[in-house]
Amino acid sequence: MKFSVLAFALALLLGVPVYADYLYTFSYVATVGPIESFSFSIDSPNLITAGATPTFPAFAITDGSTGWTIDEDLVGISTGTLLGSTLLPTGDGCFSFGTTYADLADYHGCATALTTANGPIQAGFTVDVPGGLPASTGTFSNLLFDGVATAPADEGFFNCCGGATGEFTLTVTEVPEPASFALVAAALGMTGSFLVRRVNYARVNR
């Protein structure tokens, strides 16, 4: 009996974790310029591919007095395009984000965030991933990016074109299935219960 209980508990432990989604966490750390540091995440059931518009919780960027709500995105692969005045090589991956009325357009394969005079004050930015969109988990640091927010004058934040206002980092991780934690708890509970019974049995029969 003891071996079957331990074997079953071990099987549960070896069967986890089961990963459900991929979590893309973007982080901008400002060093100069009006736009303050911000971060946000996208939870995707699969690795994100070109042409996707994955859903994400809206987030805000601010210069300390004016705020912009970012709620749209577009993902692409560069066929050779400019980010500001910096050439993005063919094959680079691009993530673009913008406010509701910002124009997110496919330009030479790469999604580009363009602000517009239509509607409320707008903001948008594009983040470049060298070599293509992430094909596995990992951390991608010091990425090229270019963004602008109108307030009503343009306020730029970027790492391209011979200058930088800060640094963008993308981290892709796998999110464990909630059931994985339940299985671990069940396995540990069964093992603990078995050990308690063994101790009690030993005390009674010594």
Image (tube, rainbow, N blue to C red):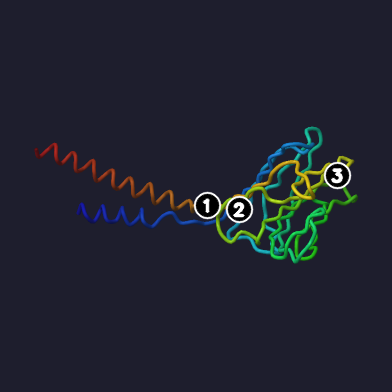
Other residues around mark 3 within 10 Å, as few (<14) / some (14–19) / many (≥20): many
Residue 128 drawn at (x, y percent): 71, 55
How many angstroms separate mark 3 from mark 2 (CA)? 27 Å
Q: Amino acid at mark 1?
A: Val
Within the image, what quadrant is residue 134 found in? bottom right
Mark 1 touches mark 3? (CB < 8 Å): no
Q: What residue is at 28 percent from the left and 43 percent from the top? A: 192
Check residue 175 in the rendering and tell me which mark sits there, or answer none. 1
Mark 1 touches mark 2? (CB < 8 Å): yes
Other residues around mark 2 within 10 Å, as few (<14) / some (14–19) / many (≥20): many
Residue 72 drawn at (x, y percent): 75, 53
The residue pinned by badge 3 equals 121
How many angstroms separate mark 1 from mark 3 (CA)? 35 Å
What quarter of the picture does the C terminus occupy?
top left
Q: Which element carries disc 2, helix, strand or loop?
A: strand
- Of 43 and 142, nearer the camera is 142
Q: Amino acid at mark 3?
A: Ile
The residue pinned by badge 2 equals 43
Residue 59 drawn at (x, y percent): 71, 44
Q: What residue is at 86 percent from the left and 44 percent from the top? A: 121
Q: Which element carries disc 1, helix, strand or loop?
A: strand
| Residue sticking out furthest to the left | 206
Work out whether mark 3 precedes mark 2 in sequence or the reverse, and give the earlier one: 2
Q: Which element carries disc 3, helix, strand or loop?
A: loop
